[in-house]
Amino acid sequence: MRFKVFAASVHGKKYFERGWPCQDSSSVLEFAGVQAIAVADGHGGKDYFRSDIGSRLAVKVAFEQIKIFCQNILEGESFSEAGIKNFEFKVCEEWTAAVKKHWAENPVRAEEIRWQTVSDKYKARFASDENYIPVAYGTTLLCAVSIGAQVLLVQIGDGSCVVWQRNGEFKVPVPPDSDNVFNVTSSLCDSDAVSKFRHAVLDCDENSPHAPVAIFLSTDGLDDCYPIFENEQWFCKLYADAIIDSMICNGLSVTADAVKNELLPHMTEHGSNDDISLAYLVAGDLNLLLRSRTVYLAEKAREKFLPRWLEERGKKND
């Protein structure tokens, strides 16, 4: 399946007002039948003082490794578990090398705005042990890679990956990470980062009702706009009732502009105040989107009707 690709990041007020750069990064990649999206969220904690650079390098390295990874996949070949694991290892390895290279080429300056917030403990560690350097650049990473009749989803850290299927259902296929609790998250800067990647492979067979129609990746700035533990419920409303509906009514290009310039700025200003990144792969066939949305709306109506019907039946039987 060929998708339309989109990615955008907006600067949250809580960082903008401090004079900090946006900690999020996002981008899209298309080449030789491959389409990919990625979002990364640099950590806002005081010791991760170059996390904005870390998130940009995470997206850059992921795309570099996707190019290598996909060139090694023969036409019609499926993603292998060994190949995916090697891809995750290479992302970790190359990101660590990239941040150490940046550190070597850009010595710390006292006037760096976030350096002033770093704890004395980590200032000493950064000066004495290069193994701590990645902490300064700590970030999460989520990416989706479409090639042939399959999509690979890879994630480390928090944020959300939501898939909308042909049958109108929303799914979260990437396994959860028990380390992601409240403001604590796994990170590319962890010494055991490679073991903390999670992934899932989607089948895009056009005859399957479970084939993806749209895939949405977001950083936790979007998650935090909603009540905790209710993200999935609200994401369904956001993606189906706002974004997909706009695509059907207004077109893909108009919707992309509105999401970037209106929706995401509104959500950070009136929601989390955090940086927000959103990226998606969405079917370019508006008729397919319309059919899937029709099924989705019918199921929503049924879910609303059945509880009322059961309640009324119960009253009649009393």
Image (tube, grey):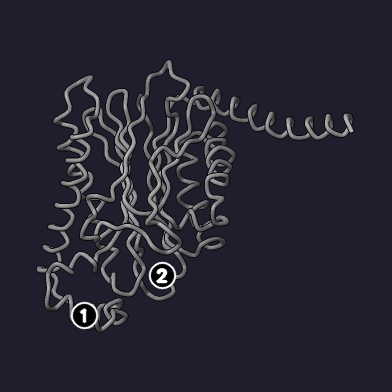
Tell me the kind of residue under disc 2.
Tyr
Q: Is residue 38 above or below residue 35?
A: below
Q: In this image, 241 relative to 305: left or right?
A: left
Question: Residue 32: which quarter of the image?
Answer: top left
Q: Position of residue 204 (x, y in %)?
A: 37, 24
Tell us which disc is closer to us: 1 or 2. 1
Whole-number angstrom distance, CA of label 1 to CA of label 2: 22 Å
For badge 1, the amino acid type reads Lys
The tag on residue 300 is: none
Q: Residue furthest front?
A: 318
The percent position of residue 245, horizontal first and vertical second, equals: 57, 35
Q: Residue at x 18, y 69 (%)?
A: 132
Image quarter (top left, top right, bottom left or bottom right) of the N terminus? top left
Near-viewer residue (266 or 293): 293
Comparing 88 with 276, the one in front is 88
> Which residue bears the numbered disc 1?
123
In x, y percent, where is residue 179? Answer: 37, 56
Name the residue: 18% across, 55% down.
95
Label 2 residue SS: helix
Q: Residues within 10 Å of mark 2 (few under 14, many from 20)?
A: some
Q: Quadrant of residue 80?
A: top left
Q: Is residue 125 left or right of residue 158?
A: left
What residue do we see at 83% from left, 29% from top? 313
Q: Position of residue 159 (x, y in %)?
A: 41, 52
- The residue closer to the viewer here, 191 or 134, is 191
Of all residues, the one furthest to the top in this rendering is 207
Mark 1 secondary-structure assignment: helix
Identify the residue under disc 2.
15
